[in-house]
Amino acid sequence: MPNSSSLTQFLLLAFTDRRELQLLHFWLFLAISLAALLANGLILSAVACDHHLHTPMGFFLLNLSLTDLGSISTTVPKAMHNSLWNTTTISYMGCAAQFFFFLFFITAEFSLLTIMCYDRYVAICKPLHYGTLLGSRACAHMAAAAWATGFLNALLHAANTFSLPLCQGNALGQFFCEIPHILKLSCSHSGYLREIGLMVVIACLGFSCFIFIVFSYVQIFRAVLRIPSQQGRHKAFSTCLPHLAVVSLFVSTATFAHLKPPSISCPSLDLVLSVLYSVVPPALNPFIYSLRNQELKDAMRKMMTGWFSGAIKCQFSGV
């Protein structure tokens, strides 16, 4: 078995050995990634160009779209390459980079979702203090803290994980480089325990964020139910439902993928779950937010109309 000093590449888990299904996975991943790039790109352009969306929620939504673009760009291209060229290899440095950036974007995304929950809490439960608590400087500091948290978490895990001696082969049971599957290749008991301890600390912090989200939504729903008019309650709920749906999708799929009972674990199920929490959310998040946000839909419609009219004018002027 090679050790980490002589290891030059890892073997990723293939979705299937049949060539027809490999090509089907390539086209499916291509469609999902293009949808994610287009949808998140539209949100970025709409928030940047429309002054009506220059709000704290618009600012955090812009940052969320950046994390979605980053996370799906980290894992999907290599999976598409392997499916297209019928290979499973990834270089040692490529695996380390993929490991770092995926953890960076995922951690930053969960931090941003926690901050966005705080935004909804202040908007509904403390509306008179909204401008004070969520001013431009406060929003910038919170977004910077989310990105810094993602960077620090990814750096600590990457530095510790890839310093461990690996002597259990180089086959990863996953289609991208992830902590649990790399740890299975380690032969250092102390390093393994150190990484497990680091994961426990990060899990406790993540659980604290989750408890904060749950507590905030309990307070939000209590405040909404006290609104006398049905129209007011509906409007308040409509601003919270997209965020709640995104958090539920993110937390439920990731939690079940990593904490499911060993008795129901199998490679095909693990692959499906990993796709559900690493690939699907970045593509669905923009659609979830745009469905219930009328200002965002209007801005995107206005922007696309301007693009189409500009293209038609250019075409006719060329003729």
Image: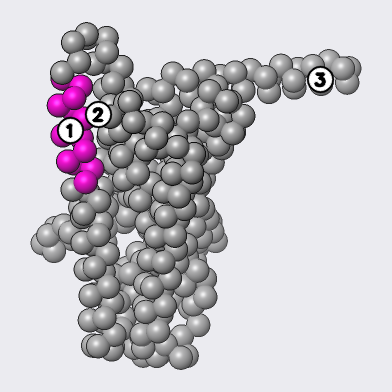
Q: From what the image shows, is residue 119 above or below residue 187?
A: above
**In front: label 3 or label 2:** 2
Would you call the spot at circle 2 few (<14 residues within 10 Å), some (14-19), or many (20 or more)? Answer: some
**In front: label 2 or label 1:** 2
Q: Position of residue 234 (x, y in %)?
A: 26, 15
Q: From what the image shows, is residue 20 above or below residue 296?
A: below
Q: Name the residue under label 1.
A: 219
Range drawn in magenta: 212-225
182 part of magenta stretch: no
Q: Disc 2 marks which amino acid? A: Cys
Q: From what the image shows, is residue 138 above or below residue 265?
A: above
Would you call the spot at circle 3 few (<14 residues within 10 Å), some (14-19), or many (20 or more)? Answer: few
Q: Mark 2 points at which residue?
A: 125
Q: Disc 1 marks which amino acid? A: Gln
Numbered disc 1: secondary structure = helix
214 part of magenta stretch: yes
- Of labels 1 and 3, earlier in sequence is 1
- Contact? badges 2 and 1 (CB < 8 Å): yes
Real-space Cα separation, disc 2 to disc 1, in angstroms:
7 Å
The C terminus - image quarter: top right
Q: Where is residue 102 in the image (x, y as percent from the top left)?
A: 43, 60
Report the front residue among 61 and 275. 61
Q: Position of residue 308 (x, y in %)?
A: 68, 20
Report the disc number at residue 315.
Answer: 3
Q: From what the image shows, is residue 67 above or below residue 118?
A: below
Residue 47 visible in the shown view: yes
- Contact? badges 1 and 3 (CB < 8 Å): no
> Which residue is found at the position 28% from the left and 29% from the top?
126
Coloration mode: one colour
Q: Main secondary structure of the magenta part?
A: helix
> Which residue is found at the position 23% from the left and 75% from the top?
197
Report the front residue among 229 and 96. 229
